Image: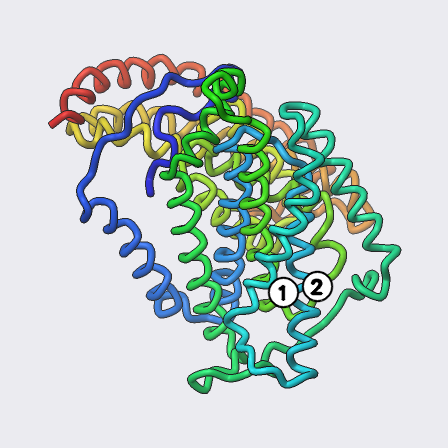
């Protein structure tokens, strides 16, 4: 689970494939244990975070994980950069809402728990139709076609008011469905466990696909489609199958969102929704199976929590994305997993002094940057509210040059300090790294 294509992920920063390396073989217990741990975490999370806001956030995380993993089937596994993945997410949500309303109106004996299958069938069907057009080419052409299809569907949603409901959207009532085991799915805790169950099932299926010959062929098409064609396979067919499966899982995510919110509108189909899942996959790391999971969790926390702290939270979101792409192209998962060999070798502790040296300038850089952004936003956008600003518990006057100078000094000190500390960090890595491979082979 910790590694989808260990060592074979593309080096997006350098624009070339990474060197392939065989993943270490593990026993049955080693393969099953991560999934048992994931199931235990999903089951126990509401007991630890039992508040209403926490349950809502956990539900959103489950939906985002399925959506991000489905996107990574395209980008990380097959090398297809899509700007329109929200099409299948949104269509899955709309068809699910209409199906729920039809089942409730007809009093059909269909429980709520199986309604995500409607989203899966919708995503799969539309993925087959749109994928037949878009997967004829890869690279930039595919990305542009996906963008065009996304605009086409988003524009059509405003015209077909009877189906998409316009700006108001389409509502439903999940409690009107057939009850099994006396579950009404009115309380959020019941909805969370439904989402968590589907999240675990989808993650297992997507991981299983990556271990099949089809998953290996997707990797091969990503790395060298000409060689795949030479050995007798059709790259376009492989891309189409991966595209359809990815769209099907995106439809499941959309269906879970429809069940969770009980309302669907045209924003589900927007380019913004496609952009969020792209950012989540990149921030988490597209080269590892667990990467999109981490990215989905981080992005959900930022969306829910950061938006309560500042009005320019999307700016910080963009800065985080830029920082990850520039300095950690492997994403947060890549950063964490690169320490694995050192931990197994018992040499990771040698990095601590260097990390401690780099921490103060890093904090100074972040605080200085936040100070400049918040003061600029207040001075330029909220000037009518006066010059007083409260930041980090401190009362600041943005009309005075002092806070600007302090923030700029902290930013400059952070940059210079990190430049000075980076050779120490690199030297610490070189010192700790030689023992890694030896320990990894033990």
Residue drawn at x 65%, y 50% as measured from the top left? 88
Above or below, 28 relative to 4: below
How far apart in space, not on screen, are marks 1 and 2 (Cα)? 6 Å
* Residue 301 position in % (x across, y down): 51, 52
The answer to whether residue 61 is left or right of residue 428 is right
- In this rendering, the answer to whether 347 lies above or below 14 is below
Q: Residue furthest front?
A: 232
Tell me, yes or no, whether the two marked residues, 1 and 2, touch with CB atoms within 8 Å: yes
Q: Is residue 413 visible?
A: no
Q: What residue is pinned by disc 1? A: 258
**Looking at the image, which is closer to me, 179 or 306?**
179
Residue name at image x 30 percent, y 52 percent:
35
Quarter occupied by the N terminus = top left
> Which badge, 1 or 2, comes first in the chain's sequence?
1
Closer to the camera in the image, 307 or 150: 150
Residue 410 image offset from top left, x and y in percent: 53, 28
Give the residue drawn at x 63%, y 85%.
107
Q: Which residue is denoted by mark 2 in the rendering?
A: 264
């Amino acid at each position: 689970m910790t590694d989808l294509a260990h060592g074979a992920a593309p080096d997006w920063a350098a624009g070339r494939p990474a060197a392939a390396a065989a993943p270490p073989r593990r026993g049955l217990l080693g393969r099953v244990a991560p999934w048992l741990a994931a199931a235990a975490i999903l089951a126990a999370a509401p007991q630890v975070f039992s508040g209403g806001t926490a349950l809502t956030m956990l539900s959103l995380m489950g939906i985002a994980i399925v959506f991000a993993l489905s996107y990574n089937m395209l980008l990380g596994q097959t090398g297809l950069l899509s700007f329109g993945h929200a099409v299948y997410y949104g269509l899955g949500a709309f068809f699910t809402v209409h199906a729920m309303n039809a089942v409730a109106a007809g009093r059909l004996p269909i429980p709520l728990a199986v309604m995500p299958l409607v989203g899966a069938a919708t995503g799969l069907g539309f993925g087959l139709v749109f994928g037949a057009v878009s997967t004829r080419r890869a690279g930039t052409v595919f990305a542009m076609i996906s963008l065009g299809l996304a605009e086409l569907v988003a524009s059509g949603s405003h015209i077909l008011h009877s189906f998409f409901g316009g700006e108001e959207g389409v509502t439903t009532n999940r409690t009107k469905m057939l009850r099994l085991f006396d579950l009404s799915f009115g309380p959020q805790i019941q909805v969370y466990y439904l989402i968590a169950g589907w999240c675990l099932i989808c993650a297992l299926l997507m991981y299983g696909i990556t271990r099949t010959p089809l998953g290996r062929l997707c990797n091969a098409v990503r790395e060298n489609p000409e060689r795949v064609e030479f050995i007798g396979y059709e790259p376009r067919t492989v891309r189409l199958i991966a595209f359809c499966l990815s769209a099907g899982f995106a439809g499941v995510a959309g269906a879970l969102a429809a069940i969770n919110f009980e309302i669907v509108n045209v924003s589900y189909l927007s380019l913004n929704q496609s952009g969020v899942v792209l950012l989540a996959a990149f921030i988490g790391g597209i080269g590892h199976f667990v990467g999109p999971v981490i990215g989905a969790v981080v992005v959900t926390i930022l969306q829910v929590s950061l938006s309560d702290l500042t009005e320019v939270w999307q700016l910080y979101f963009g800065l985080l994305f830029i920082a990850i792409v520039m300095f950690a192209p492997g994403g947060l998962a890549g950063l964490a997993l690169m320490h694995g060999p050192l931990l197994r070798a018992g040499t990771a502790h040698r990095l601590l002094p260097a990390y401690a040296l780099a921490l103060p300038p890093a904090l100074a850089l972040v605080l200085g940057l936040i100070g400049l952004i918040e003061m600029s936003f207040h001075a330029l956008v909220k000037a009518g509210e006066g010059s007083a600003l409260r930041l980090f518990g401190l009362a600041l006057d943005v009309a005075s040059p002092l806070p600007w100078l302090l923030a700029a000094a902290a930013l400059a000190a952070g940059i210079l300090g990190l430049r000075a500390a980076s050779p120490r960090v690199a030297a610490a890595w070189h010192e700790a790294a030689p023992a890694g491979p030896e320990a990894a082979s033990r």
